[in-house]
Amino acid sequence: MPLPALQMVEQKIGRQIRLLEIKKGIIERKIGKQIRLFEQKRDGIGKKIEKQIKQFELRRGIRLDDEVRFIRSWIERPLSIGAVTPSGKVLARTMARYVDPSSDGPVVELGPGTGPITEALVESGVAPSRLVLVEFNPAFCRILKARYPDATLVQGDAYSLRRLLETLLIQPAAAVVSGLPLVTKPIRERWRLIRDAFDLMVPGAPFVQFTYSVAAPLPKRLGGFTVEASERIWMNLPPARVWVYRRP
Ligand SMILES: C[S@@+](CC[C@H](N)C(=O)[O-])C[C@H]1O[C@@H](n2cnc3c(N)ncnc32)[C@H](O)[C@@H]1O
């Protein structure tokens, strides 16, 4: 191709590239605007919910601080929180019932949130100093620290249980109680978590997990553990069931 023709082709390509860059910039700005609009809407909804809760509290003369914090966290990270409100008392007490307060060793709670199950455990006779609370939400950690100063609080990812607790636990745990939204994780990760939990516990100790879903959080076919389940707890929003796994 003669040189002038080549230069013309180059100029054409250059123009196309500049046009594409302009278009890309416009699309990026549009997407950015949509994201900002979505975030504003989300914040707006969050504020509206909080306002309604405050009005409800004023009318009834009660405090729903925990629920507000929970809803706020859920709005920010729905999948990792896994619930819109903290567990109710009936569910929390059912969870605690599977832990023998006279057993020996620490009681590990995964995903304690604002602490309804923690409270049930303490009510049932587990000394707060035996509790090891693993929670990654900093706002929930602040609440737990204020409410359970004698418990050991670990701010971290419960799915790295072995790394978090291996050196921290000076004796095998008597139970692991989990409020994690386990079913949002792939089965392989759930299996790794329960295996690590079993390794940190005395043989036969319970891994207690609640779930809103109909299916078991860990299918029996995985093997290597025994399974028992509570009745469905209708007095909870949403209704839930407690599953207990033990490695003989
Ligand atoms: C369904 S809520 C249950 C909270 C509380 N146990 C209750 O029953 O009300 C799940 C909790 O697990 C925590 N969580 C979720 N993923 C976690 C992770 N990978 N490590 C630690 N905590 C986690 C959330 O921050 C939240 O507090």
Image: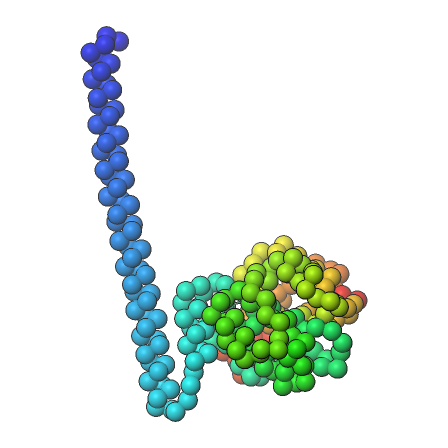
Q: Give coordinates of residue 55: x percent, y percent.
A: 33, 85
What residue lies at 36% left-to-right and 81% top-to-bottom? 53
Please tell me which residue lies in front, 185 or 166: 166
Can residue 222 be seen at all in this image of the molecule? yes
Quadrant placement of the C terminus? bottom right
**Quadrant in which ligand 1 is drawn:** bottom right
Q: Quadrant of residue 3?
A: top left
Q: Is residue 243 left or right of residue 38?
A: right
What residue lies at 66% left-to-right and 85% top-to-bottom? 124
Q: Quadrant of residue 10?
A: top left
Q: Give coordinates of residue 15: x percent, y percent.
A: 21, 27
Q: Is residue 38 left or right of residue 169?
A: left
Q: Give coordinates of residue 215: x percent, y percent.
A: 60, 66
Q: Is residue 69 left or right of residue 117?
A: left
Q: Is residue 212 left or right of residue 164?
A: left
**Colour scheme in the image?**
rainbow
What residue lies at 63% left-to-right and 83% top-to-bottom? 122
Q: Give coordinates of residue 232: x percent, y percent.
A: 59, 78
What residue lies at 42% left-to-right and 86% top-to-bottom? 63
Q: How many marks?
A: 0
**Extreme residue toward the front, this view:** 149
Above-or-below relation of 2 to 117? above
